[in-house]
């Protein structure tokens, strides 16, 4: 049946049967550590760049959300360590004084997911609001500049 865990439709696989979630897991787990430590705003833009790189995975996440809503999803156990690594990277940034310590790292990660995916998940809204498509280099330049600014505002000097 379409959309059930049994048919495993939510895991895009090439003709050779390769599990794309498993193949991309090492890169997605290493990505948070790849963000530069200097320049507090830059780490947030990395999420946008990676969202474009992993568009197939974003597509899977959208389908999973529509199909399973808040229930368990296929391969959830394999994916949780990736998300936890991303949350830990935010904690490391807080401990290093690069980010306000009073922010909940899990909620900051959720904001990163939202900001990095929204233009691609709802491209029609992005186009109607900005006049540009999400893949347009002009949009990406402006979006990344805004995210760098937001990232700087998450710094410790802006904590209440």
Image (cartoon, rainbow, N blue to C red):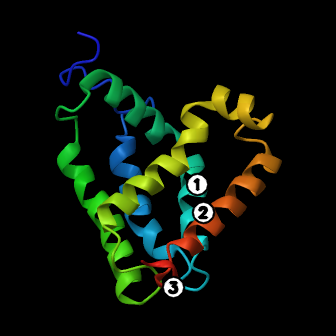
Q: Residue at x 44, y 69 (%)?
A: 32
Q: Is residue 76 left or right of residue 95?
A: left
Mark closer to the chain start, 1 or 3 = 1
- Using the image as rendered, state which of residue 148 and residue 43 is in the foreground: 148
Nearer to us of marks 1 and 3 is 3
The picture places residue 157, in percent across and down from the top left corner, at 51, 85
Q: Which residue is mark 3?
A: 157
Cα–Cα span, label 2 and label 1 = 5 Å
- Using the image as rendered, state which of residue 3 and residue 129 is in the foreground: 129
Mark closer to the chain start, 2 or 3 = 2
Circle 2/circle 3 CB separation < 8 Å: no
Q: Tell me if I can see residue 16 in this picture.
A: no
Cα–Cα span, label 2 and label 3 = 20 Å
SS type, badge 2: helix
Within 10 Å of the Cα at label 1, are there few (<14), some (14-19), or many (20+) other Cα atoms? many
In the rendered image, the residue lying farthest to the front is: 160
Hey, which quadrant is residue 66 in on the image? top left
């Amino acid at each position: 049946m379409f959309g059930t865990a049994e048919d495993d439709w939510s895991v895009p696989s090439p003709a050779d049967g390769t599990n794309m979630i498993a193949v991309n897991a090492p890169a997605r787990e290493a990505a948070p550590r790849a963000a530069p430590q200097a320049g507090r705003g830059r780490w947030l833009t990395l999420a946008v760049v990676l969202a474009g790189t992993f568009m197939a995975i974003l597509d899977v996440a959208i389908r999973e959300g529509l199909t399973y809503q808040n229930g368990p999803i296929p391969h959830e156990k394999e994916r949780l360590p990736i998300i936890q690594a991303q949350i830990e990277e935010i904690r490391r940034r807080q401990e290093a004084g690069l980010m306000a310590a009073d922010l909940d790292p899990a909620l900051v990660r959720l904001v990163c997911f939202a900001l990095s995916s929204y233009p691609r998940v709802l491209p029609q809204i992005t186009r109607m609001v900005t006049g540009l498509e999400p893949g347009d280099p002009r949009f990406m330049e402006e979006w990344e500049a805004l995210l760098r600014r937001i990232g700087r505002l998450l710094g410790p000097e802006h904590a209440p």
